[in-house]
Amino acid sequence: MEPAPISFDNTEIAFKGKSDSDLNRSYYLFKLIGNPSLVKVGDVMTNFALALHIPIGWAIKGNIFKQFCGGETITECSRATKILDKGNIGTILDYSVEGKESEKDFDATTEETMRTIQTAHNNDHIPFCVFKVTGVARFALLEKINAKEKLMDEEIAEWQRVRERVDRICGLAEKTGTPVFIDAEDSWIQDAIDDLTNEMMEKYNGKKAVVYNTIQLYRHDRLAFLKKCHQDAKSKGYYSGYKLVRGAYMEKERARAAEKGYQDPIQPNKEASDRDFNLALEYCLENIDNISICCGSHNEQSSMLLATMMDKKGVSRNDKRVYFAQLFGMSDHISFNLAHAGYNVAKYVPYGPIREVIPYLIRRAKENTSVKGQTGRELGLIIKEKERRKSERN
Ligand SMILES: Cc1cc2nc3c(=O)[nH]c(=O)nc-3n(C[C@H](O)[C@H](O)[C@H](O)COP(=O)(O)OP(=O)(O)OC[C@H]3O[C@@H](n4cnc5c(N)ncnc54)[C@H](O)[C@@H]3O)c2cc1C
């Protein structure tokens, strides 16, 4: 029998985890952050407050933090996990502390990431874990390695410690059977991350994909890179795992390339990013025998494309080698409708001390500001669901 077609239009399914008061909170929040000037002022004031160590956690804990984060600790994230679980959606615990530079912090982040893997091991609702290499390594060191500069003796020792941290995380992932994503970051440190990740894949992906690299298709060279990595893996006899994303740092990438006078690594336009993203989905699905993928996207068209390609190819909707993923608090209409139709879906649930996750929250707020006064997508969906509930009551 043909599987039933899917649609992302059903807001009843999309928001079934939200009570009326949750929905109202989201409504006022998205209305507020839909205003670009307010977000700009908020950004400046928040950075100011952070720089002066003014306590601001209380001001955001009940609203923007609650919308986009699971809590301050793994335990506090169980609220989010329960909401997602109601919709048959997995949780990906994402310890979102950024911008740390000390060895003590890198060790602490390694331990915390390993705790997320242990938590996942005892919890069927957590299908993946994730970390950023900049959470366990100094940015300037990664830059130096990326540029193939000669390291000093103490830097060689420092790099060895980074490698050991990453190896401990990936080793535990393999031991417990919980796959781990390694996030992609700025292009001027990404070669260093890719080399280390490929090494980990070779070491730990012998039986299945445990370590996943992230491929940013907003870069014009990444489709070819994906294919090359996969061919290398095949020839060496290990499985590949890829999280496919468009990429989060476009403005920064373009500004740096212009400032330093090198070729912009980003695609010439959005259409080119979309084309390569969809081609990458297609390539991975064609090679599903030795590639596992996670489609990390809020794009309806790409999500629909992957879903329909799976059905056409006869890849079962609950085949663990294919996952869809979105961020907590965003695009519930994609996540919940896909999961309702039987596909594998998980959401990144960022967590950490409020002060530390503020840069993440500012990025989410900026992403959700409206374009030329139009109602943003999230807000439009919330309004639709509020109206549906109202008419159901009448
Ligand atoms: C589960 C998950 C994990 C993620 N992990 C990472 C990660 O590890 N690393 C990372 O960098 N990002 C990551 N992201 C963010 C992601 O890269 C995108 O920024 C975000 O998801 C928006 O893209 P989209 O596919 O949802 O869809 P869309 O909203 O359709 O696309 C927006 C994206 O298209 C690209 N784009 C926009 N305009 C142009 C243009 N003019 N020219 C070229 N390209 C353009 C940009 O990448 C932009 O972010 C992750 C996202 C999710 C949901």
Image: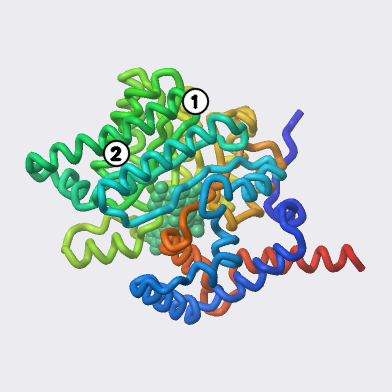
Pinpoint residue 65: horizontal percent, then vertical percent. 55, 62
Q: Taking the image as drawn, is residue 299 in sight?
A: no
Position above or below: 148 against 229: below
Q: Are marks 2 and 1 in contact (CB under 8 Å)?
A: no
Q: Going 57% across and 51% down the picture, which residue do you hit?
A: 301
Q: Give the vertical position of 30 relative to 351 (above or below).
A: below
Which quadrant does the N terminus fall into? Answer: top right
Q: Which mark is residue 194?
A: 2
Q: Foreground residue, 146 or 230?
A: 146
Q: Residue at 44%, 78% (x, y): give it.
A: 40
Q: CA distance from mark 2 to mark 1?
A: 22 Å
Residue at 59% in and 30% down: 313
Instruction: Specify whether 46 is left or right of 302.
Output: left
| Residue under label 1 | 177
Q: Quadrant of ligand 1?
A: bottom left
At x 38%, y 33%, the residue is 169
**Mark 1 CB near ligand 1 (8 Å cut):** no
Front disc: 2 or 1: 1
- Rate crowding at label 1 as few (under 14), some (14 to 19) or many (20 or more) other CA atoms within 10 Å: some
Disc count in the image? 2
Amino acid of disc 1: Gly
Name the kind of residue labelled 2 in the image.
Asp
Q: Is residue 169 left or right of residue 83?
A: left
